[in-house]
Structures are given as C-alpha cells and as structure tokens.
C-alpha cells in the first residue's frame, strides 16, 4: 500500500511540474489592481497580468521558466512563432507594418497579455500606446495622445479598459480580446510547426 501511494505521489508531482504550463489557468483577484474574473483561455494568462500564456510558452520550451517568460524571451527563443504571429497581427491591422512584435510587447508580463491588449485597442479604438503604458506602468510613447496620468501605475487589462474607455464593459471586452488573442497565438503556433 505504501509503495502504491509513493508511486501515485510521484506521478502527481511529475504531472504537476511537467503538465502545469499546458493547462489553461484562470486569473486571480479582482478590484482595481487585480485581474477580472470570468475570463478564460490560454491567452488570458496575461490579460489580467496573473499568468503566462501557455501556448506561447510551450513553444519556448515549456516548463517553469517558460511560464514566467517575458514576450521578448518567448519570441527570441522561437523565431518561427515570432514571424508567424507578427505577420498574422499585421494582416489583421493590429500591429503596424515594420513594427517588431518584441518591441511592441516590451514591458508586458507575457505574450497573451500583449496580444489581448492589441485586440482591445483595435476593438475599442483605444491607442495601443495608452493601454501598453497603463499595463506596464511606464510613460506612454512620445507623441501619444493618452489622457493625463496614463502609465503612472501598473494596471490589469480590465482596469486599463475601465480607465481609458469608461463606457465599455471592461469584463466583456477583456474576455472577447482574450479569446481573440488565444486564437491568434494558437494559429501562429500551428503555422510555425508546419
């Protein structure tokens, strides 16, 4: 009996360590500083800033280190994903031609968070520079037409939506953008494998 328990415990540990990045995770928290609950999908592992994108991270080698990887690290390690995702986002008008995806996503916690912010920007006609500034807690790019106070503190995607587009349903928009980002990353991941 003890041997069976030891084997089962070992199997659980192996699954927990090796399989963790493959499972969709849900954001934690709520309120002004936390993520909005209710959003799902692999790309969500970033829209609230709580988790890394499992699809993109599995492409970067998986494991614990990939789960905490910045977009730049993930895209540098997987140049095919970088190329396919960049082309896809540019074809949809989410990323300006000639823009390096690693540069656009600089400062974001993970790739899913960045791509979801691009979708929110496009869907709600909010300048990406303003969303990026709020979500990364950095001043907006020079020449941006962001409201005063943008980028003074790090915000979740939902809170940033509320701040920059108060009439929008932040939860709904975040969920929609997360699904769109998830689909884009999965499509680029599939294309990079072929």
Image: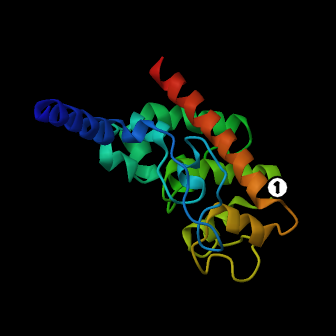
Residue drawn at x 59%, y 28% as measured from the top left: 187
Viewed as shown, does residue 174 lie left or right of 21?
right
- Give 13 or 62, whichever is nearer the viewer: 13
Q: Is residue 103 above or below residue 16?
A: below
Q: Report the colour scheme.
A: rainbow
Viewed as shown, does residue 65 lie left or right of 145?
left
Question: Whole-percent x and y of residue 82?
Answer: 49, 38
Badge 1 is on which residue? 124
Residue at the extreme top: 194
Residue at the extreme front: 1
Q: Is residue 118 above or below residue 154?
A: above
Question: Whole-percent x and y of residue 92?
Answer: 73, 37
Residue drawn at x 56%, y 31% as measured from the top left: 186
Viewed as shown, does residue 64 lie left or right of 89?
left
Q: Residues within 10 Å of mark 1 (few under 14, many from 20)?
A: few
Residue at the extreme right: 167
Question: Whole-percent x and y of residue 174?
Answer: 71, 53
- Give 126 or 178, whichever is nearer the viewer: 178
Q: Secondary structure at mark 1?
A: helix
Figure label count: 1
Q: Is residue 172 visible?
A: yes
Question: Whole-percent x and y of residue 140?
Answer: 64, 72
- Give 92 or 37, whichever is nearer the viewer: 37
Residue drawn at x 51%, y 40% as measured from the top left: 24
Q: Is residue 29 above or below residue 19?
A: below
Viewed as shown, does residue 100 lie left or right of 23?
right
Q: Is residue 95 visible?
A: no
Quadrant that contains the N terminus: top left
């Amino acid at each position: 009996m003890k041997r069976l328990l030891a084997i089962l415990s070992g199997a659980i540990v192996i699954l927990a360590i090796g399989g963790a990045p493959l499972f969709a995770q849900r954001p934690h928290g709520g309120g002004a500083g936390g993520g909005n609950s209710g959003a799902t999908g692999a790309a969500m592992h970033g829209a609230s800033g709580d988790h890394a994108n499992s699809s993109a991270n599995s492409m970067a080698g998986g494991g614990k280190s990939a789960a905490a990887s910045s977009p730049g690290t993930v895209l540098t390690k997987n140049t095919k994903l970088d190329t396919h995702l960049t082309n896809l986002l540019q074809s949809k008008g989410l990323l300006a031609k000639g823009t390096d995806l690693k540069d656009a996503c600089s400062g974001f916690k993970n790739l899913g968070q960045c791509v979801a912010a691009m979708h929110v920007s496009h869907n709600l006609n909010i300048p990406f520079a303003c969303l990026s500034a709020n979500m990364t807690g950095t001043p907006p790019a020079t020449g941006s037409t962001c409201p005063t106070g943008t980028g003074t503190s790090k915000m979740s995607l939902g809170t940033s939506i509320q701040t920059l587009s108060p009439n929008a349903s932040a939860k709904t928009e975040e969920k929609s953008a997360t699904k769109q980002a998830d689909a884009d990353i999965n499509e680029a991941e599939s294309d990079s494998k072929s």
